[in-house]
Amino acid sequence: MRLFFYLCILVVAACYTYGAFFDLTFMNNRGNVGPGFFPRILGVAIIVSMLLLILSDIKKGTLFSGTQNSQFQDAAVLIGLSLTFGLVLMVLGYVIAIPAYLCATLFYFNRGKHVTNGAVTVAVPAVIHFLFAGLLNASLPHGLWW
Amino acid sequence: MEIFDNLLMGLSIAITPINLLYLLLGSLIGMTIGAIPGFGPSAGIAILLPVTFSMDPISAVVMLAAIYYGAMYGGTITAILLNTPGDSTTVASTFDGFPLAKQGRAGPALVMQACASFTGGTIGVILITLLAPMFVLVTRSFGPPEFFLLTVMGILTLVALMSGNWLLGLVSALIGFALGTVGVDMVTGHQRFTFGSAELIGGIHFIPVAIGLFGIGELFHAFYSGAHKSGTGGIVEYKNEERFWPTKKDFRESKFTMPRNSIFGFCIGLIPGAGATIASLMAYSLEKSFSRNPKKFGQGEMRGLTAPESANNAASSGAMVPLLTLGIPGSASTAVLLAAFIMWGLRPGPLLMAENPEFAWGLIGSMYLGNMALLVISIFAIPVFVYIIKAPYRILAPVVLVICTMGTFSVNASLIETFIMLGAGVVGFFMKRFGFSPAAVVLALVLGPMAEESLRQTLLISRGSFDIFFMRQASLYIMAFFVAIILGGIFLNSQRRREKLKEKTA
């Protein structure tokens, strides 16, 4: 898992550096620092630092640590539910997304406590609506269908 | 005398009924957020920042500052009762705080930490009052070269003073700098890494990144660590029937510890990048080394709790000095505050106190009142916070995530930013899992554009030559100062490694 994360950073850094070298100029027409000056330096620095980090972890023998275990499963479920919440929020709006998310999360992690789960599922969206839409007059996502 | 006139003006602004209400509200909210494990001042300010947009800037900053140091007070509650620091700034408080609670002295420990926090916060604010105007006189001679050095050196200091692998801190900072380059280049108008998106033309906003990394990432990591499984009810070390107030001996032993470590913590907080975490850990080490009975530390020694507590609250005040006088945040929390100031059209820096004295002195005035309010709140509301901590994490976590998501959306009514927040949450989880520094990312995200702007101005002035950094006296002093800090940090880290090695072999 650690190696996977490192490789993700390395790939994104490589794409960033590629963009910095090929889409942005290092110096502008007047010989001053151009839009690509900082990004090129940063991109190369990230790649070099990540390679050093990978080498350092290989030396310590920690590169292949952080493999999946049962605790990671719970985190993965929460992450999955949260990202799904974001998508449902975009499509259906907060009125449906918030209770659905709370219901699903509490059903999975707080099993058996139906009264508590029900109370939280009803109370939290109501409080959020009152706080944001009512008191603060802040915008809330209404979804594509509203 | 001018200082006291300005302070009186500031207090008169802070004592208005509406600002007092926001101060109390912010203090309560800050303490509550700080009491939730993993949520510190940075997360508290970032999460609640969107709520303040419809407020008057002075009232808003009074509330945010109250949340800032309220969270410092609240973070110690979980450190003492659960052996779980509320934030990295309260790690040192667990060393003796939790042993005290296990001895049945949770009440006295909580009261003493409130007194130590009050002492640190008050001394810190007094020192701000005296030193901030002097800082302004010094910083008036600063130009783009000095601002560039301060921003970059601030990040490097944070990286160098990190315990563990400094490469992880460096990569985190570089990622933050890289995120700061997204948007439109300020000089040429060229779009950078926007991928044709109208929303990214304005750059990546720091709020979704800060909320994602600090708030959401912490939730995910807490579930990974299993915090949701047992809840906290069974392991909170606090019983209502135990003795609540400290003894005279507790106050007598700490009477020099608190002011001494307050001044020390404030000085550390002044250094951009150092922050309250470093201050509290160093204060603990120093107090232990000065003690006649160092072996008592770690076994429930009251000074082992009051020393880091005074230092971290004073350091949080110290971090406000470079923020207000230079516009350079000293920590992740003040980085979030800086972004808030800019959003309200204020430009922290040498001219802030001259052009917006009511803002700067109103904020300082509110900090005096806030510390008094927090002392009273934290002592008498302890049973309430214990009740909140006893709420199972598996219920708190999704509720907090929903609030964070709605708060992020409400800033610019942007779903892209909501997805950035969720994405940052996933990244923040992995960063925390593998030892990276989310604080360095946020600090660099805020400082990066400032650093680039000042570097480009510097190179325009010097016609492309880097010699300008060695020709200006102020630049040379700044470089020498930060080299000393970084060498000191490297020395401190090697000392810690040697001590760990000694403990292992003993």
Image (cartoon, coloured by chain):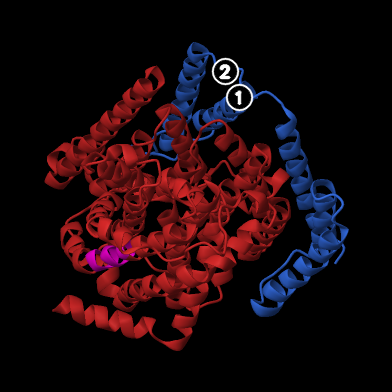
Quarter occupied by residue B319: bottom left
Q: Depth check: B187 or B265 in front?
A: B265
Distance between the Cα atoms at labels 1 and 2? 6 Å
SS class, disc 2: loop
Q: Does residue B455 belong to the magenta stretch? A: no
Q: Which residues are magenta?
A: B119-127
Determine which residue is flagged by label 2.
A63
Where residue B251 is drawn, which disc sits there?
A: none
Sequence-first tag of 1 and 2: 1
Colour applied to chain B: red
Locate residue A136 relative to residue A141 in the image: left or right. left
Q: Depth check: B256 or B201 in front?
A: B256
Q: Position of residue B53 (x, y in %)?
A: 54, 71
Locate residue B154 relative to residue A132 in the image: left or right. left
From what the image shows, is residue B240 above or below residue B429? Answer: below
Quarter occupied by residue B320: bottom left
Colour applied to chain A: blue
Q: Residue at x 47, y 68 (%)?
A: B378
Q: Mark 1 and 2 residues: CB-CB less than 8 Å, in contact?
A: yes
Quarter occupied by residue B407: bottom right
Q: Residue at x 45, y 81 (%)?
A: B19
Q: Chain of mark 2?
A: A
Quadrant of the frame with the C terminus of chain A = bottom right
Determine which residue is flagged by label 1.
A2
Residue type at tag 2: Leu
From what the image shows, is residue A129 above or below residue B136? Answer: below
Residue type at tag 1: Arg
